[in-house]
Amino acid sequence: MNEVVDFINVNRDRYVDELKQYLAIPSISALPQHTGDVRRAAEWTGESLRTAGMQNVRLIDTPGNPVVYGDWLGAPGKPTILFYGHYDVQPVDPLDLWTTPPFEASVRDGEIYARGAADDKGQVFMHIKAIEACIRKTGGLPVNMKFFIEGEEEVGSVHLDEFVRAHKQDLAADVVVISDSPMFDRGIPSICYGLRGLVYFQIDLRGTRSDLHSGSFGGAVANPAFVLAQVLAQMKDRGGRVKIPGFYDDVRPLSDSERAEWKKLPFNETRYRKELGAPRLFGEKGYSTLERVWARPTFEVNGLLSGFTGEGAKTVLPAVAMAKVSMRLVPDQHPDTIAGLFETYVKKTCPPTVEVKVTRMHGGKPWMTEFDNKYVRAAGRAIEKGFGRAPVFNREGGSIPVVSTFQEELGVPSVLFGVGLPDENAHAPNEKLDLGNFHNGIIASAYLYQEIAELT
Ligand code: BES
Ligand code: ZN
């Protein structure tokens, strides 16, 4: 391994230069005008896998964006790793809040800033470079490896369940490795054993055929903006509890042992609050912040639109109001069940004075796993070698829809070893990746393949 690590150290700057090219491709899966860029990012991913020495590299079409596949199967008798990640990124607005342009990666204070730096191109590239170093210096990999990089994660991986089911044989492996999550904190690497699920909706209300003079008509018809506020206000009580009937029925309670483990984590609530710039933290009564984010479901408003929002004042009754809302789910809630409960509740709480349309968008199932297995232990050793410190075990509040599908369809464990940071600004302006973590992550990844190869 020494020559592999030396190679990684020597090539540190080259990796950053190459990553900048990857980050320059605006592969925003949510926006149709970027379909060509998304494809370009797929091709770039494939090309860098080829350069790294992977074989059978190809783009596989799906009804949506292509999947990038590549493998190296030259270690008969050794375990097979399926590495999953995504090359698509989130939209960049509000653009004016970026210090440097989102698709012109810029390095400041040891961090690389660009959309996709942490989520997830930087972390995918980290594994590609680890592979490259192993193949260059040792002529091959210690394990068998399959790369499976998709382009629709940020829009809910809608075509992926079907894809995984149809390609079960091709994707067969002993363990899934994913790097698409933050570490617990700066200097504290972690292995994530649970993710929340998601169900996302758009609510459209219409009050009248057209906007109206609020003097001539105000008081005679319902105002959809106001009705929307009332409907949304019915979703949660003041103690942060979701009021949709049946919402908590399938929630798996947090175990005493998990709760005790999380209490031991070096989490500083005051620092967390200050970094967020929040006057106070707020969440469901009876739970700590980590418990709220990792183990409890929530209802959130993602966006609101109605009426006049320009400068000055305009006396108008808006004709329509729209909200984007989503619920984060925990085991054993099911997106379909929760979607049904939500739709029923909106129809019940919304008065007949407006027309209501509820549109379901993407989502994903929650995931949680037993993490006392040899692969996780191997990852722990590898992370310790790369980062100089053993990882802690955490859950996360975010979602990666395909992870539960891997569990159900492939029946193998997943190891989530992410090198982002809680302040990485994923999905927000000024997304960044710490280059020290990127570098250590390449080394840890190379050790991970070695550690898994040595398992019996
Ligand atoms: N990398 C995130 C998932 C993540 C976020 C894991 C935070 C752990 C902590 C991923 O790219 C993502 O953003 N997923 C979406 C999925 C959704 C669109 C179905 C999410 O969580 O919003
Ligand atoms: Zn994301």
Image (spheres, rainbow, N blue to C red):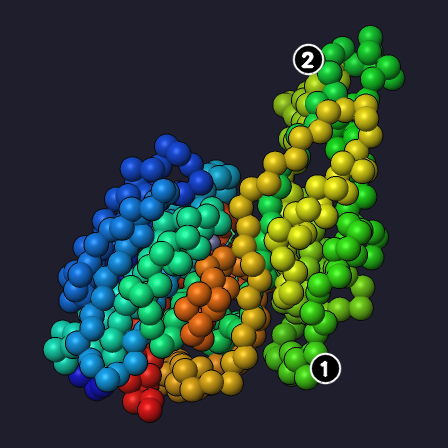
Secondary structure type for disc 1: helix
Q: Earlier in the sequence, mark 2 or mark 1?
A: 2
Instruction: Give the position of the C terminus as an image quadrant.
Output: bottom left
- Which residue is found at the position 57% from the left and 62% from the top? 366
- Residue 446 x/y as whole percent: 28, 78
| Figure check: 270 above or below 137 | above
- Residue at numbered disc 1: 256
Q: Amino acid at mark 1?
A: Asp
- Residue at numbered disc 2: 210
Circle 1 Cα neighbour tier, 10 Å, few/some/many (<14 / 14–19 / ≥20): few
The label number, if any, that marks residue 211 in the structure image: none
Secondary structure type for disc 2: loop
- Which residue is found at the position 70% from the left and 74% from the top? 254
Of residues 346 and 18, the one drawn nearer to the viewer in this rendering: 346
User: Tags 2 and 1 in contact by the CB under 8 Å rule?
Assistant: no
- Residue 217 x/y as whole percent: 82, 11
| Figure check: 370 above or below 424 | below
- Residue 403 x/y as whole percent: 47, 64
Of residues 72 and 386, the one drawn nearer to the viewer in this rendering: 72
* Residue 395 makes an appearance in the image: yes
| Figure check: 311 above or below 39 | above
Of residues 195 and 91, the one drawn nearer to the viewer in this rendering: 195
Left or right of 376? Residue 392 is right
Left or right of 260? Residue 418 is left
- Which residue is found at the position 28% from the left and 55% from the top? 68
- Residue 196 x/y as whole percent: 59, 62
Q: Amino acid at mark 2?
A: Ser
The Cα atoms of the two marked residues, 2 and 1, are separated by: 55 Å
